[in-house]
Image: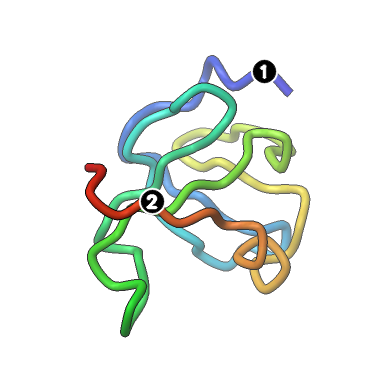
């Protein structure tokens, strides 16, 4: 899947249509999600990343992943401490 159509502020959803996050930017082979979608507890306030290999399609202002939301979040990578 070509990721050239992925833009800042697009919604990222699972194959089941459930909201996973909002695109901050494409960083190489990963989609960097905004901090506001970072979760709770120790995950709060950190950027998370989703591999572009999970992208099934870009439709309008949404990036649909090939995995359901509950599975896709298991593949999220957390930002390294000290990075922004």
Q: Is residue 30 above or below residue 18?
A: above
Q: Nearer the viewer, residue 56 or 60?
A: 56
| Residue 75 placement: quadrant | bottom right
Residue carrying label 2: 79
Q: Nearer the viewer, residue 6 or 84?
A: 84
Q: Nearer the viewer, residue 61 or 55?
A: 55
Q: Residue 2 — which label?
A: 1
Q: Residue furthest bottom?
A: 41
Q: Position of residue 41 (x, y in %)?
A: 31, 84
| Residue 54 placement: quadrant | top right
| Residue 78 placement: quadrant | bottom left
Residue at 39% from the left image edge and 27% from the top image edge:
7
Q: Is residue 50 above or below residue 70?
A: above
Q: Residue 18 — which label?
A: none
Location of the N terminus by quadrant is top right
Q: Position of residue 62 (x, y in %)?
A: 51, 42
Q: Residues within 10 Å of mark 2 (few under 14, many from 20)?
A: some
Disc 1 and disc 2: Cα gap in Å?
24 Å
Q: In terms of secondary structure, where does tag 2 sit?
A: loop
Q: Position of residue 46 (x, y in %)?
A: 29, 59
Label 1 or label 2, whichever lies nearer to me, is 2
Is 25 left or right of 36, judged from the image as shown? right
Q: Nearer the viewer, residue 29 or 1?
A: 29
Location of the C terminus by quadrant is top left
Is 76 left or right of 49, judged from the image as shown? right
Q: Residues within 10 Å of mark 1 (few under 14, many from 20)?
A: few
Query: Which tag, 1 or 2, sits closer to the chain's start?
Result: 1
């Amino acid at each position: 899947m070509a990721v050239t159509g992925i833009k800042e502020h697009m919604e990222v959803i699972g194959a089941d249509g459930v909201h996973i996050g909002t695109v901050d930017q494409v960083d190489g082979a990963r989609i960097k999600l905004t901090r506001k979608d970072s979760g709770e507890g120790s995950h709060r306030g950190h950027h998370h990343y989703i591999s572009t290999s999970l992208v099934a399609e870009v439709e309008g202002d949404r990036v649909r992943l090939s995995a359901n939301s509950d599975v896709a979040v298991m593949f999220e990578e957390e930002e390294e401490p000290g990075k922004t």
